[in-house]
Amino acid sequence: MSSENQRSTPELVGQIADALQKKQWLLTAAESCTGGLISAACTDLAGSSAWFDRGFVTYSNDAKTEMLGVDAALIARHGAVSEEVVRAMVEGALAHAHAHVAVAVTGVAGPSGGSDAKPVGTVWFGWGTPAGVVSEIRRFAGDRAAVRAATVQHALQQLAALLT
């Protein structure tokens, strides 16, 4: 987790909250490898109901399909940890929420489940705003807890940057 302007999670959430409230936008999160940690970080801030609509914990492939409308054939073709799936998660979250902005993550937190193509620590991120969907892949070092913490931090940091 190397970033030049590393801010604490509460600081990032405060910045996100301010930006969303100024625009009168709501946020939704679609999470796989983080299991709800992004939503928890957002709702740790008192008053978050003014800008946080809902979170989807879609850990299984069936959950991605049933809750977000991600095409099962897309998952079968590209794998759950892929750019195509994270983008579909963003679009599904926006379609199934009353939000203007979405963040989605899917990855391999470990300690098992990795492959040569997608080693442990591989995470796909997606952010959706009225301007469109942006996605990126990152690889984080460390154990399961470190990968999940780095994922939450990066997701929020990039969301804050997109909103400001």
Image (tube, helix red, strand yellow):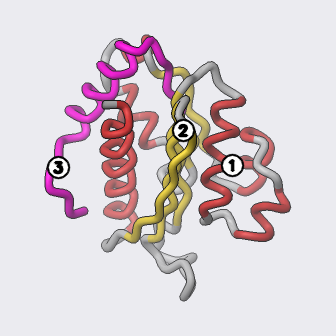
Badge 3: residue crowd in 10 Å (few <14, some 14–19, many ≥20): few
Element under label 1? helix
Q: Disc 1 and disc 3: Cα gap in Å?
A: 29 Å
User: Is 95 or 47 nearer to us in this picture?
Assistant: 95
Residue 164: where, in percent of width, then height?
A: 30, 31
Compare marks 1 and 3 and give the one earlier in the sequence: 3
Instruction: Tell me, yes or no, whether the highlighted magenta stretch contains residue 16.
Output: yes
Which residue is identified by label 2?
128
Badge 2: residue crowd in 10 Å (few <14, some 14–19, many ≥20): many
Badge 1: residue crowd in 10 Å (few <14, some 14–19, many ≥20): many
Residue 127: where, in percent of width, then height?
A: 50, 43
User: Is 138 or 131 nearer to us in this picture?
Assistant: 131
Q: Disc 3 and disc 2: Cα gap in Å?
A: 22 Å
Instruction: Tell me, yes or no, whether the highlighted magenta stretch contains residue 156.
Output: no
Q: Disc 1 and disc 2: Cα gap in Å?
A: 10 Å
- Residue at the right extreme, as displayed: 73
The three-letter amino acid code for the residue at tag 2 is Gly
Which residue is identified by label 1?
88
